[in-house]
């Protein structure tokens, strides 16, 4: 029983039922009142029915000295009030559950969006939509069964027991109590028995969502590697497991339900036999005989509901437990004791001081003892082989991850002394894979800031996309498709640059921002990048060295270490790795066919 209590407790904790939820409290109290009121009236009805029969047959055992008409009137009134209370209950209940569901969804959303970046690299993220919707359903189930069933049925049972205790010999009540105890025991034992199956089929169901999510988000990759059958195999494997555990669950449920009915139904026969004997001997009235039958049957159905309710709570608890597991993953927090919500300093230099960093918080350092300072308003470039750690530096500046050792200084303060929001507001980043939202070009550019068309078109012009957008039937209101897939890679990149510029940040990071552009477009866009990043602290990460030659300084990264730094001319004469990178690029330029199918490839700068 303790775990049942824990489930309910966990549910209310997930809802954060205490504290600020005053509205919920009011609804809850109203529901409790209506529920209790309706239960009392429900139990009074068989009692009045007994009085009515005794009054009609003229039995002297009638306890209320009222006329038959008066009893009929009271009986009918009780019936009407009980039903009206039920209807009112439904109205308040709907408000309560909807409000509770909204609060839970609100809490879940706030939490999920603040989970650390590492979480989103795991497969679990695909199961989140299913977890949240199931938890919302779970909330409905738990509130519904606990208020509609558990509380009223328990109360009804106590009232019925009291009436039976007063009117009948002790044996009748003893039989009733024994059968109910067996019933409750079977319900608890059964629920614990089937819970693992339920947990398993829920997990398998989540995994089917995970596989589907992967296919939907990487449909082209699946097709290009002919992975359809492989993914279908995975999907069906989880569906088969889901079916297996579901079957076990429902077979056991049916068995447990039958056992419960046996326990309560079995009690009906001796209770009726005893009552009949009492009626026969004149110890009880006909009304009392009818009442005990009505009371027992009236109790069987709610008890059945109670068993079902217990299982529903358990099921709901499994769903909520899954959400609770997500809610218990620590979120990104700002510095304890308050972080600066704004970056006031106008001069923003960036310094890495002996920074060590590993993604897994282990000793596999991706950055090792990295130190550099980018003075305010300067443009620094990072070059190095793939996997050297260039993008990692930008992720650390954005505070997607926290460093393991050392320090990052922004202006004159530690980066961690600013809130993550403040840091992210100040940095405009064009990441390696620009992701657009499945919305209009306008939304993807201004993110709801409602900037003027003129401003948006100017930013598009700076990346050479104005003519393209003008040529679209819906212009800025064109929807770009899932992750912007209706645009080409280069167009996505240019939208990414335009929106970073529109943000008017103090710091700019361009991570391979022009890698998908042809050389001619790249040259134009690079020129504009240089123009917008003037006066701003800027980081450019690029494989094509032609795009970074004008940087104030170039830092060469190799296996997580800064191995050299200087201008292009300094590095070309002093740094072997840089020389190699430059040569490789040069060779590719030399071997490039100058004219492919009539398309002239312009000579690269400096060639
Ligand atoms: N989220 C992650 N979890 C674990 N390891 C990661 C993660 N992201 C990157 N790495 C590892 O960190 C190292 C540096 O990655 P990073 O993305 O910084 O490289 P890069 O220099 O930007 O490479 P590229 O030029 O290919 O973009 C790589 O070895 C990579 O495998
Ligand atoms: Mg990278």
Image: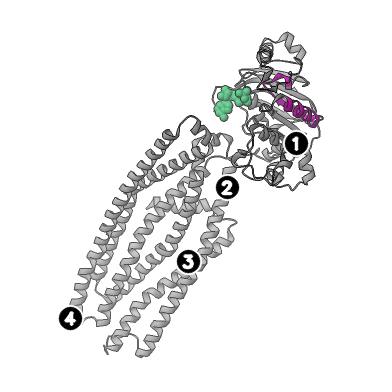
Mark carried by residue 280 = 4
Discs 3/1, front: 1
Task: Check disc 1 and report the residue beneath it.
Answer: 501
Count of labels shown?
4
Q: To which quarter of the image does residue 309 belong?
A: bottom left
Between 235 and 487, the one lying in front of the other is 487
User: Which of disc 4 and disc 3 is earlier in sequence?
Assistant: 3
Alpha carbons under labels 4 and 1: distance apart: 95 Å
Residue 535 part of the magenta-drawn span: yes
Q: Earlier in the sequence, mark 4 or mark 2?
A: 2
The kind of secondary structure element at disc 4 is helix
Tell whether label 2 touches label 4 (CB within 8 Å). no
From where the camera sits, is residue 268 visible? yes
- Circle on res. 590: none
Label 1: how many residues lie within 10 Å, few (<14), some (14-19) or many (20+)? many
The answer for how far apart the CA atoms under marks 4 and 2 are is: 67 Å
Q: Is residue 314 above or below residue 528?
A: below
Residue 359 vs residue 513, the one in the foreground: 513
Q: Which mark is residue 32?
A: 3
The residue lying at 22 percent from left, 73 percent from top is: 272
Q: Nearer the viewer, mark 4 or mark 2?
A: 2
Residue drawn at x 33%, y 77% is 46
Q: Is residue 79 above or below residue 456?
A: below
- Going from N to C along the chain, the mark reached first, 2 or 3, is 3
Q: Mark 2: which secondary structure? A: helix
Residue 338 image position (x, y, % from top left): 68, 41
Report x, y in % for residue 297: 29, 70
Q: CA distance from mark 3 to mark 1?
A: 56 Å
Q: Residue at x 24, y 82 (%)?
A: 286
Where residue 428 sits: x, y (%)?
72, 35
The earlier-in-sequence mark between 3 and 1 is 3
């Amino acid at each position: 029983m303790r775990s049942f209590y824990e489930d309910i407790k966990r549910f209310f904790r997930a809802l954060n039922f205490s504290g600020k939820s005053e509205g919920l409290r009011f609804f809850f109290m109203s529901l409790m009142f209506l529920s209790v009121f309706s239960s009392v009236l429900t139990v009074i009805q068989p009692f009045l029915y007994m009085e009515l029969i005794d009054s009609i047959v003229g039995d002297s055992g009638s306890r209320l000295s009222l006329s038959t008409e008066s009893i009929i009137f009271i009986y009918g009134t009780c019936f009407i009030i009980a039903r009206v209370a039920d209807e009112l209950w439904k109205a308040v209940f709907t408000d309560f559950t909807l409000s509770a569901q909204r609060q839970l969804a609100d809490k879940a959303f706030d939490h999920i969006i603040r989970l650390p970046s590492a979480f989103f690299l795991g497969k679990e993220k695909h199961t989140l939509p299913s977890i949240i919707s199931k938890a919302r359903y779970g909330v409905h189930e738990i509130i519904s069964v606990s208020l509609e069933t558990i509380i009223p049925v328990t109360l009804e049972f106590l009232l019925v027991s009291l009436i039976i205790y007063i009117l009948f010999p002790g044996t009748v009540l003893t039989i009733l109590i024994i059968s109910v105890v067996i019933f409750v025991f079977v319900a608890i034992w059964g629920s614990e028995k089937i819970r693992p199956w339920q947990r398993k089929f829920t997990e398998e169901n989540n995994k089917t969502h995970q596989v589907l999510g992967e296919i939907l988000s990487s449909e082209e990759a699946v097709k290009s590697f002919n992975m359809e059958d492989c993914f279908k195999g995975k999907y069906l494997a989880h569906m088969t497991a889901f079916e297996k555990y579901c079957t076990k669950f429902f077979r056991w449920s049916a068995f447990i339900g039958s056992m419960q009915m046996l326990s309560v139904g079995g009690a009906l026969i001796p209770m009726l036999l005893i009552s009949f004997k009492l009626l026969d001997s004149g110890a009880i009235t006909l009304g009392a005989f009818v009442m005990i039958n009505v009371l027992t049957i009236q109790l069987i159905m709610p008890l059945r509901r109670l068993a079902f309710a217990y299982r529903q709570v358990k099921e709901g608890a499994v769903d909520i437990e899954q959400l609770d597991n997500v809610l218990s993953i620590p979120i990104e927090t700002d510095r304890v004791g308050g972080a600066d919500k704004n970056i006031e300093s106008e001069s923003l230099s960036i310094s890495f001081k002996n920074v060590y960093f590993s993604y897994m918080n282990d000793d596999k350092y991706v950055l090792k003892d990295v130190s550099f300072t980018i003075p305010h308003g300067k443009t620094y470039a990072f070059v190095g082989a793939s996997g050297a750690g260039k993008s990692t530096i930008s992720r650390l500046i954005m505070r997607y991850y926290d460093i393991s050792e050392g320090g990052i200084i922004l202006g004159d303060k530690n980066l961690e002394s600013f809130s993550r929001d403040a840091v992210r507001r100040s940095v405009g980043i064009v990441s390696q894979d620009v992701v657009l939202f499945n919305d209009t070009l306008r939304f993807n550019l201004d993110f709801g800031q409602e900037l003027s068309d003129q401003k948006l078109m100017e930013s598009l012009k700076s990346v050479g996309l104005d003519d393209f957008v003008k040529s679209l039937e819906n212009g800025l209101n064109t929807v770009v498709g899932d992750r912007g897939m209706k645009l080409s890679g280069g167009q996505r990149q240019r939208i990414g640059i335009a929106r970073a510029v529109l943000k008017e940040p103090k710091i700019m990071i361009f991570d391979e921002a022009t890698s998908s552009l042809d050389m001619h477009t790249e040259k134009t866009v690079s020129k504009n990048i240089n123009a917008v990043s003037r006066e701003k602290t800027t980081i450019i990460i690029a494989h094509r060295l032609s795009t970074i030659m004008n940087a104030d300084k170039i830092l060469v990264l190799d296996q997580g270490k800064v191995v050299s730094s200087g201008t292009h001319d300094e590095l070309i004469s002093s740094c072997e790795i840089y020389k190699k990178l430059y040569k490789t690029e040069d060779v590719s330029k030399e071997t490039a066919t100058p004219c492919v199918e009539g398309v002239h490839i312009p000579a690269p700068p400096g060639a």
